[in-house]
Amino acid sequence: MRKSILTGIVMLLAACSSTGDNKSYYQLPSPAQMAVKTSTGQSQGNRQLWVEQVSVPDYLAGNGVVYQTTDVQYVIANNNLWASPLDQQLRNTLVANLSNQLPGWVVASQPLGSEQDTLNVTVTGFHGRYDGRVIIAGEWLLKHQGRLIKRSFHIELKQQQDGYDEMVKMLAQGWQQEATSMANELNRLP
């Protein structure tokens, strides 16, 4: 009897100690890569866009996924982590989203030449919130033919389920939504 109680306690302690070390890693889902946009062998586009930088503030730049617990308090998760730096994920998915949504454009994360437009994005909010919403906020600055175009964005989406998996999916959906808004603006340029 004593041996079985001791075994039970040891198993309980082992279970408790191992749950604190379970880490989950998250990567923003990338849109499906589209096939080559032209089938004639011509250049894919005559307009060029360099996504120079997507920057995030220090509280988002760490490994932990961020969750806002009150109006003024944020928690950076210890066990729910980004698989790669968030700024890199945001930049890569932005390039992929814009590439898919801007036919006639070559969109890249590297400089393309002297005739390129240059896009810089500052993300100030990319987190879940206590009321079941996710926040995607910031501003972007486009240099186009010597002109500067600056736009702010603030997107709030309601999570359909609880949990970090759902939160990351909704954050990715909001980021894609903002990429669509950027693409619409870029398509209106002369």
Image (cartoon, grey):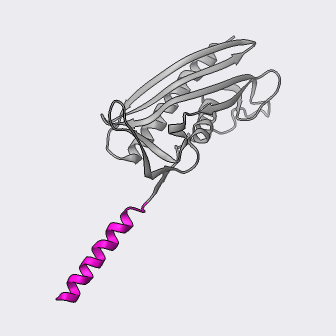
30 or 2, which is in the foreground? Answer: 2
Number of dots carrying numbers? 0
Horizontal placement of 94 versus 26: left or right?
A: right
Q: The N terminus appears in which quarter of the rendering? A: bottom left
66 or 146, which is in the foreground? Answer: 66
* Residue at image point 42% right, 37% down: 170
Which region of the structure is painted magenta? 1-22
Q: Is residue 78 above or below residue 161?
A: below
Q: Is residue 152 above or below residue 99?
A: above
Residue 5 magenta: yes
* Residue at image point 71% right, 15% down: 144
State whether residue 162 appears in this view.
yes
Residue 141, image x, y percentages: 63, 20
* Residue at image point 29% right, 78% down: 10
Residue 53 magenta: no
* Residue at image point 66% right, 31% down: 53
Q: The C terminus appears in which quarter of the rendering? A: top right
Q: Is residue 180 above or below residue 185?
A: below
The secondary structure that dominates the magenta segment is: helix
